[in-house]
Amino acid sequence: MAHTDSPIVTRFAPSPTGNLHVGGARTALFAWAIAQRARNSGAGGRFVLRIEDTDLKRSSEEASRGILEDLAWLGLSWDDGPEFESGDTRIGGDERGVGPFYQSQRKDLYDAFVQRLVDADLAYPAFDTPEELDAMRAEAQAAKKTFVYRRPEGYDRDAMLERAAAEEHVVRFKMPPEAVTVRDEVLGDVTVPFEELDDFIIRKRDGMPTYHFAVVVDDELMGVTDVVRGQEHLNNTPRHAALIRALRHEDGREFRMPRFAHLPVIANPDNSKMSKRDRDKAARAKCREVGVEALVQIHGRVGVGEGDFHAWLEDKTRQLPGEPLERLAAAVGVDLPEVAVDDFRRSGYLPEVLLNYLALLGWNSGEKDDEGKNIERFDLGWFVERFELSRVGKGSSK
């Protein structure tokens, strides 16, 4: 079931695990522009901000606050989402009654939909240990096959449900035995054969939903008609489409299929994928050059505890807050790349300049100036009037 006559609703749904990356800001801009253009044309249009903080260990209130501040600074106000004061303006709220907007506060909703799938035998509890899963992967690798998890033959559903009442477990979605085709507004039809789609986890051992499950439920309950995100999520989308087709509301209504648009990857000058961790990566590499003895004298001066510092040094997924990271970079003598909105703010850029840069990362209007060159300087109103997904490129952008 697809959205047909519904007013346009877009969303931006970042994870608060670090600063707002340039790629995320571009996604927010494009999603905001779609909603704004629909509103300007009299066809409705709302922009939702949702904070996807189901990864409780890595999410932080500081990162959530920073994301709100950065979006407000850019002028990308959200209609539905966490309330936030920017100067004399209050942004956000829950006029439509679709909140809360932090996923960590929506667990009861997810549990109800998971249970509905389990009751219909469309999902099932699984108890595999990490060691058992590693053995399955090794077996597949030895056979030169891609590891795809399937519910074991002879699975005793009643026994496993009884066991699930007493033991920690994950819940996996039982993938229907068919290929999945998704229509993408940028890339066209994308088809993934059943053989490449596993029975993926929808609820983790800690009881929290996975990204795959929470995003599908939230998009439906918040009335999202258009999902705009980066191409790194493309492999997830067939799984989401299968979930959408399987899920039902309590009254039996089907979930609606949103329109999908996957934006091109943003590349660094060396053609590597730009990442929000690039700054930490550069500082971490320099720290290793400097050596352990010198670092003992450094971490205290930059305002990072010894334990946190060594954890950051060893874990490439960790990020240091902006100011300590900059002090560390100065101490070890390394220039940090600008990859987050906050980096540009600290460097003195105006929001209008950054928005102009973001708009041209994968999109152009097709219009020329008097000299026959592509128009590359414009304001937000001009951009909204002309923005269409059909003008977004498929290849990576710099």
Image (tube, helix red, strand yellow):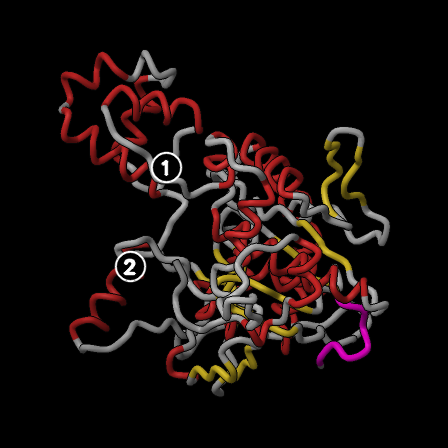
Please state which of residues 219 and 365 is positioned toward the viewer in this rendering: 365
Give how far apart the Cα atoms at labels 2 and 1 are: 23 Å
Residue 221 appears in the figure:
no
Q: Secondary structure at mark 2?
A: loop
Q: Nearer the viewer, mark 2 or mark 1?
A: 2
Q: Secondary structure at mark 1?
A: loop
Q: Quadrant of residue 218?
A: bottom right
Whether residue 4 appears in magenta in the rendering, the answer is: yes
Residue at the outermost bottom position:
178
- Answer with left or right where residue 266 lies relative to residue 82: left
Check disc 2: other Cα within 10 Å, few if <14, some if 14-19, many if 20+.
few
- Position above or below: 235 against 95: below
Q: Position of residue 230 (x, y in %)?
A: 49, 62
Please name the residue shown 72% across and 46% down the image. Answer: 77
Q: Position of residue 198 (x, y in %)?
A: 42, 73
Q: Which residue is mark 1?
A: 318
Q: Which residue is mark 2?
A: 271
Does label 2 or label 1 sit earlier along the sequence? 2
Most frequent secondary structure within the magenta stretch: loop
- Position above or below: 212 against 57: below
- Answer with left or right where residue 113 lies relative to residue 268: right
The residues colored magenta run: 2-8
Under mark 1, the amino acid is Arg
- Answer with left or right where residue 372 lies relative to residue 67: left
- Position above or below: 95 against 33: above
Under mark 2, the amino acid is Asn
Please state which of residues 397 and 298 is positioned toward the viewer in this rendering: 397
